[in-house]
Amino acid sequence: MINKSSKASVGKSCLLLQFTDKRFQPVHDLTIGVEFGARMITIDGKQIKLQIWDTAGQESFRSITRSYYRGAAGALLVYDITQRHTFNHLTSWLEDARQHSNSNMVIMLIGNNNHYMI
């Protein structure tokens, strides 16, 4: 299981939709609580079901987001490359991820721009 976390409106849900359904949706409603998607991937010849949990970025959902770090194999911290403040805000999300996860969880930083389809 992979958990995606960060400030609201940086494109976390668009990334999930692209990864699971291979489609781009330029307008997306804010995530309320948690959404998830899954995709089968192959690693070393083995089929693995990868679940990605998309957590809400609003501060009011922060306590819910923290509970999803437990048991996660990884966390994707996402920021909008066109909005510096979303990058600066990652410090608190990184602290949360480290504090509420197991010590083996992999944490990746992703710079995103969900305003353009490339």
Image (tube, rainbow, N blue to C red):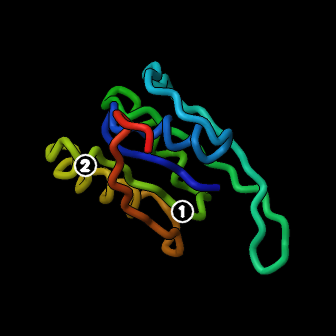
Task: Give left or right: position of 94 versus 41.
Answer: left
The amino acid pointed to by label 2 is: Ile
**Regarding mark 2 in the picture, which secondary structure is present there?**
loop
Task: Give left or right: position of 58 versus 43.
Answer: left
> Mark 1 Cα within 10 Å, few/some/many (few <14, many 20+)?
many
Query: Which quadrant would residue 76 be assigned to in this image?
Result: bottom left
Numbered mark located on residue 81 in the image: 2
The residue beneath circle 1 is 74
Numbered mark located on residue 39 in the image: none
Q: Residue at x 40, y 30 (%)?
A: 61
Percent x, y for residue 69?
51, 53
Quarter in which the C terminus is drawn = top left
Indicate whether 41 appears above or below 80.
below
Which of these two is toward me, 43 or 101? 43
Task: Give left or right: position of 66 versus 54.
Answer: left
Query: Which quadrant would residue 9 be assigned to in this image?
Result: top left
Percent x, y for residue 79?
30, 48
Percent x, y for residue 72?
59, 58
Percent x, y for residue 32?
48, 22
Quarter in which the N terminus is drawn = bottom right
Task: Give the residue at the far bottom of this rendering.
Answer: 44
